[in-house]
């Protein structure tokens, strides 16, 4: 399993390879050993999940640890970490194995939020799983169909000022209104890290969402061009509650869409004063159209530039050399033919 049972050691190493937020599994494992009185050390490596970022292999000196738990989110990082001097090393997270889970008795523990210095969030899942079967997503395979997972009290810490939900398809839960009302009663700032399904928005859901003390922009998803009509329709509902530039959409590019479709989705969001966050599929980095994807992400993912400059103006300011500017311009010309 995951090496939790039969432990009598006194020092535990917890290795966070590439999480951009506090790693929930490691915090729960830390809680388990904290209850036993063991010392726990967090080793945070800060590796990136992007293929084009430079990364080097690291060897961890495990001689002072009785057990080491390594968690990685991205498969491309799984071969980069080795351990010497410790015989009991356990690896988990989607980067290693999407089916491996921590034991249920550990899963149900409240996270050890003190493991990450400066953390301000209570973090957890109210629901797990997803009923969609998107080709690019492993969540249904890993977690199964959508189901309620944990009550809020299981991971909520009233001493922390914010709450972060990691749910993958929260608005599809039949009890989502009830759960949103529970979140509202905490009077804490709330954010859904994974984004919400805008296609499932209703008047009632929009109203209660808007009543939360929301942390940052409301984030939804616009991954499929064919969803444009339903997103346009639901924007009419959402506009009653959210002002200009208060809404962000994750926009997946480079997977099964054309360059024209990618640019059209982004342009649609700009016209409706919504922010895109371009998420480049790994295909983008080996594509002949890589310059376009790089420039599109650079423009969209900087809200100040996106709101105030057209893509054409952005390109002109971004590229010093005419040669590099023409690479993206030529790609755009070819897509519009």
Image (spheres, helix red, strand yellow):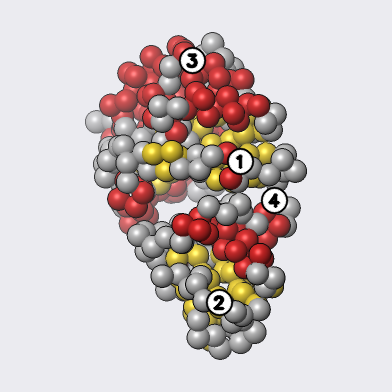
Q: Of marks 1 and 3, which one's residue comes earlier in the chain?
A: 1
- Please give left or right for residue 228 compared with residue 38 in the image: left
- Please give left or right for residue 220 compared with residue 214 in the image: left
Q: Of marks 2 and 4, which one's residue comes earlier in the chain?
A: 2
Q: Of marks 1 and 4, which one's residue comes earlier in the chain?
A: 4
Give x and y (percent) for residue 336: 28, 30
The C terminus lies in quadrant: top left
Give the residue pinned by disc 1. Answer: 153
The N terminus lies in quadrant: bottom left
Residue at the image point whose x is 62% and y is 34% from the top: 190
**Secondary structure under the numbered disc 4 in the rendered image:** loop
Q: Of marks 3 and 4, which one's residue comes earlier in the chain?
A: 4
**Secondary structure under the numbered disc 3 in the rendered image:** helix
Label 2 to label 3: alpha-carbon separation: 49 Å
**Mark 2 surroundings within 10 Å by alpha-carbon count, few (fewer than 14), some (14 through 19), many (20 or more):** few
**Secondary structure under the numbered disc 1 in the rendered image:** helix
Residue at the image point whose x is 72% and y is 40% from the top: 158
**Mark 4 surroundings within 10 Å by alpha-carbon count, few (fewer than 14), some (14 through 19), many (20 or more):** some
Give the residue pinned by disc 3. Answer: 204
Q: Which residue is situated farthest in the left direction here?
A: 337
> Residue 200 occupies which quadrant of the picture?
top left
Give x and y (percent) for residue 77: 45, 67
Give the residue pinned by disc 2. Answer: 7
> Residue 285 occupies which quadrant of the picture?
bottom left
Label 1 to label 3: alpha-carbon separation: 24 Å
């Amino acid at each position: 399993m995951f090496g939790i049972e039969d432990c009598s050691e006194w020092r535990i190493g917890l290795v966070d390879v590439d999480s951009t937020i506090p790693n929930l599994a490691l915090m729960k494992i830390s809680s388990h050993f904290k209850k036993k009185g063991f010392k726990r050390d967090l080793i945070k490596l800060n590796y990136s999940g992007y293929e084009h970022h430079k990364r080097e292999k690291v060897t961890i000196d495990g001689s002072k640890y009785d057990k080491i738990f390594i968690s990685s989110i991205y498969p491309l990082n799984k071969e980069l970490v080795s351990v010497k001097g410790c015989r009991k090393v356990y690896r988990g997270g989607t980067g290693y194995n999407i089916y491996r889970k921590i034991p249920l008795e550990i899963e149900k523990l409240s996270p050890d939020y003190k493991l990450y210095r400066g953390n301000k969030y209570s973090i957890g899942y109210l629901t797990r799983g997803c009923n969609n079967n998107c080709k690019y997503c492993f969540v249904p395979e890993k977690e199964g169909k959508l189901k309620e997972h944990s009550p809020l009290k299981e991971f909520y810490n009233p001493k922390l000022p914010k709450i972060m939900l990691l749910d993958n398809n929260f608005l599809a839960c039949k009890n989502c209104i009830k759960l949103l009302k529970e979140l509202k009663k905490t009077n804490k700032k709330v954010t859904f890290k994974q984004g919400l399904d805008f296609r499932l928005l209703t008047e009632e859901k929009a109203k209660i969402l808007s009543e939360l003390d929301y942390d940052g922009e409301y984030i939804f998803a616009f991954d499929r061009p064919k969803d444009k009509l339903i997103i346009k329709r639901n924007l009419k509902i959402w506009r009653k509650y959210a002002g200009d530039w208060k809404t962000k959409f994750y926009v997946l590019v480079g997977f099964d869409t054309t360059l024209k479709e990618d640019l059209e989705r982004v342009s649609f969001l700009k016209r409706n004063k919504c922010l895109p966050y371009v998420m480049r599929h790994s295909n983008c980095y080996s594509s002949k159209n890589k310059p376009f994807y790089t420039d599109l992400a650079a423009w969209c993912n900087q809200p100040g530039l996106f709101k105030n400059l057209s893509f054409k103006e952005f390109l002109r300011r971004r590229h010093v050399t005419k040669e590099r500017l023409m690479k993206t311009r030529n790609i755009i010309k070819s897509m519009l033919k």
